[in-house]
Image (spheres, rainbow, N blue to C red):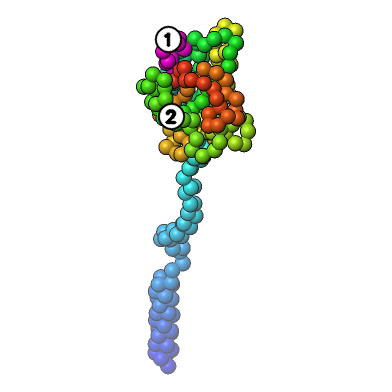
Amino acid sequence: MKRQNLMKRQNLKLAIIGGLAMAAVIAGCTPDQKDNSTAAPAPMAAEPVVPAPPPVVSAPAEIPVGHAMVSLKSAGDMKVSGDLTLAAEARGVHITGTINGLTPGTEHGFHIHETGDCSATDFKSAGGHFNPGGMEHGNPNSDTHHAGDMMNLAVSDSGTATLDVTVPGVTLADGGANDVMNRAIVIHAGPDDYSSQPAGDSGSRIACGVIAK
């Protein structure tokens, strides 16, 4: 009997030891520490695509840029001379300059003529008034007149005519129908009456100059 009890106690002890060993193995296989592995970073959100601003486009010029000069020469034994400057503007062509050699206190017909040729001694080579619109001659401030019609040139008591006038409706160096480049400016012996056809009855041509660069 004693022998059997002793064997039971030994078997119980072995069972307890085996159970404890098994529990230790199971405990070793169960992770109780935090995972220290580095997690993959979350993908970054894509930046919004901002469309490029449209290219800056310069506004077209209102008029073609143009400049020109006129050197007047006189007919026969006249002593008329002068240099004029022409510049394109929004309303037309601005003409400035000084003319000398005319009789003090007088007025003279003053026009743009159709042909840039002052080679003839009487300047007839300059043709008629510049008239692309086919209008009748008239006062340049009226509704009916040649494109080349201008107000009479007034001479001061000192014999100098100072010019500062804009010829409306004409252009300079744009190649259009109203372009006055390579045409002529003519001064007449008498004043323009603004009514006689076809040129205002202003007499002979006493000075002429070609509009050129």
**Residue 136 visible, this orientation:** yes
Q: Quick one: quadrant of the N terminus?
A: bottom left
The residue at the point 43 percent across, 29 percent down is 127
> Residue 7, which numbered label?
none
Q: Position of residue 175 (x, y in %)?
A: 42, 37
Q: In the rendered view, would you say 79 is above or below 212?
A: above
The image quarter in which residue 168 lies:
top right
The image quarter in which residue 24 lies:
bottom left
Q: In the current view of this chain or complex, which residue is farthest to the right?
A: 142
Q: Residues within 10 Å of mark 1 (few under 14, many from 20)?
A: few
Q: Quick one: quadrant of the C terminus?
A: top left
In the foreground, 79 or 189: 189
From which residue to which does the magenta span run? Answer: 72-80
Q: Residues within 10 Å of mark 2 (few under 14, many from 20)?
A: some
In what element is the residue under mark 1?
loop
> Residue 77, which numbered label?
1
Q: Position of residue 108 (x, y in %)?
A: 55, 18
Q: Amino acid at mark 2?
A: Gly
> Residue 127, which numbered label?
2
In the foreground, 160 or 136: 136
The residue at the point 41 percent across, 91 percent down is 4
Q: Amino acid at mark 1?
A: Asp
**Residue 47 visible, this orientation:** no
In the foreground, 100 or 22: 100
